[in-house]
Image (tube, helix red, strand yellow):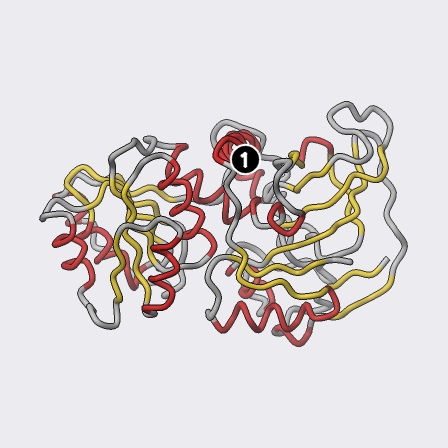
C-alpha cells in the first residue's frame, strides 16, 4: 500500500510518500480502505515537529481525520461488517465520560499513526459509522473539527434555541459550529477579515458578520449587534490573542469555549471572567458518544460539511500548503484513490 509519513517532522516538505505492506487486522480490529482524509490546524504544528504534548514517533503517518470502507474483519469483531462506511475517532480510547490523560495518548496522527494511507487498521471501538447521505470526503471532516464544535455547543451546558453564538473566523470548527447552531434555532454572529467569507458565512446561516479589520475592537460591534447584552456562547479558536475580546463579547453568565491557539500563547487575566460570571471551558475534541450524538443531528437535518477544496492523494503536500495559507472556508480534504 501507499502511505505518507514524516521520517522526522521538519516542515511540510519533509513529508514522504512510501510503499509498504498492507496491514492485517488482529482480534477485535477492522481493516479500513481509506477514501479521504482532512486537515486540521494541529496537523500543521505536527508537520513542524511541535505537537502540544510529547515527542512525535519517528516515521509518523499524519492526519487524525479520515473515512473509508471496512474491507476485512479480525476475529471477534461484532460492531461492523465488511462494506460499512466509517470514520476513525480522533482519540481512539475516549469512548464516553470525562476525558482522561490516557485518552490523549491514543490520538491519531500525533501520539499514534494517522490516516494518510491507503489502508488503516482500527480497533473496532475506535470508529463510528458515517451518515448515509455523506460522501467519504464529507465524512472525513467529522472526527476533529465536527466533534470539537459539537462538544463546545452541546456537551457542557447545551445551546438552546434562541440563544446567540459567536464564531471566530471561518475555519472548520467555526463553520461546523455555525451549522449546528443554526440547526438548533440559534442566532450566529461570525467574524472574518474577508467580506467575501462573511458573505459565504451568511449564506450558510449566519445572521450577522463582523469584519475585524474594519472593526479592530470587534467585541464592541458584537455588543452593539446584541443590544449591549453580549452573546451566550463564544467558539473561541484564536487563543490568547483574541480571548480578552471574546470575554468582553460574552453576556454576563455566558460561556466561552476555548478551542484553538491560532494567535499563539500568552497570559490570561482572570478578572473579567470572574466579574462577568463566565464559564470558560477548555475543549479538546470529544468522545465516541459525542461523535455518535453529532451524527444523529447531521442525519436528522441532512447537514453537509463545508469543504473548500479536495486534493488528490499525490498532491498531499499541496493540501498542507493550502491549509497554511488560510485562504479556505471550511475544510481542506485529500481524496485517497
Q: Residues within 10 Å of mark 1 (few under 14, many from 20)?
A: many
Compared with 184, 106 (above or below) is: below
Quadrant, the N terminus: bottom right
Which residue is the extreme one toward the bottom?
13
Which is nearer the eye, 206 or 63?
A: 206
At which x and y percent is residue 195? 32, 68
Which residue is nearer to you in this view: 5 or 144? Answer: 144
Determine the image quadrant of residue 253. top left
Dividing the picture into quarters, in which one does residue 24 lie? top right
Q: Nearer the viewer, residue 70 or 136?
A: 136
Q: Residue at x 33, y 57 (%)?
A: 168
The residue positioned 25% from the left and 42% from the top of the image is 164
Say which element carries label 1: helix
The residue drawn where x is 60% and y is 49% is 138
With respect to residue 45, does 85 lie above or below?
A: above
Residue 264 seen by the camera: no
Amino acid at each position: 500500500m501507499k502511505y505518507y509519513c514524516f521520517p522526522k517532522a521538519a516542515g511540510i516538505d519533509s513529508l514522504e510518500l512510501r510503499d509498504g505492506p498492507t496491514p492485517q487486522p488482529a482480534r477485535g480490529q477492522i481493516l479500513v480502505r481509506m477514501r479521504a482524509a482532512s486537515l486540521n490546524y494541529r496537523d500543521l504544528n505536527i508537520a513542524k515537529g511541535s505537537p502540544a504534548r510529547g515527542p512525535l514517533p519517528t516515521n509518523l503517518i499524519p492526519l487524525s481525520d479520515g473515512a473509508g470502507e471496512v474491507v476485512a474483519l479480525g476475529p471477534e469483531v461484532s460492531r461492523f461488517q465488511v462494506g460499512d462506511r466509517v470514520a476513525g475517532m480522533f482519540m481512539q480510547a475516549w469512548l464516553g465520560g470525562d476525558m482522561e490523560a490516557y485518552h490523549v495518548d491514543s490520538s491519531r496522527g500525533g501520539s499514534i499513526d494517522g490516516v494518510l494511507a491507503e489502508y488503516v487498521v482500527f480497533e473496532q471501538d475506535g470508529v463510528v459509522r458515517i451518515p448515509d447521505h455523506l460522501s467519504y470526503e464529507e465524512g472525513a471532516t467529522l472526527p476533529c473539527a465536527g466533534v470539537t464544535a459539537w462538544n463546545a455547543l452541546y456537551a457542557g451546558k447545551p445551546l438552546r434555541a434562541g440563544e446567540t453564538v459567536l464564531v471566530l473566523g471561518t475555519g472548520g470548527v467555526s463553520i461546523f459550529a455555525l451549522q449546528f447552531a443554526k440547526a438548533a434555532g440559534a442566532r450566529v454572529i461570525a467574524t472574518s477579515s474577508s467580506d467575501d467569507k462573511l458573505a459565504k458565512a451568511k449564506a450558510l446561516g449566519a445572521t450577522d458578520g463582523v469584519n475585524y479589520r474594519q472593526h479592530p475592537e470587534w467585541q464592541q460591534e458584537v455588543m452593539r449587534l446584541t443590544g449591549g447584552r453580549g452573546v451566550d456562547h463564544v467558539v473561541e479558536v484564536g487563543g490568547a490573542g483574541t480571548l480578552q475580546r471574546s470575554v468582553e463579547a460574552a453576556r454576563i453568565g455566558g460561556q466561552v469555549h476555548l478551542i484553538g491557539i491560532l494567535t499563539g500563547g500568552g497570559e490570561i487575566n482572570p478578572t473579567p471572567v470572574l466579574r462577568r460570571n463566565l464559564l470558560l471551558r477548555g475543549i479538546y475534541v470529544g468522545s465516541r458518544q459525542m461523535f455518535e450524538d453529532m451524527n444523529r443531528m447531521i442525519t436528522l437535518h441532512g447537514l453537509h460539511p463545508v469543504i473548500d477544496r479536495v486534493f488528490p492523494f499525490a498532491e498531499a503536500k499541496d493540501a498542507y500548503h493550502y491549509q497554511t495559507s488560510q485562504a479556505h472556508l471550511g475544510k481542506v480534504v485529500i481524496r485517497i484513490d
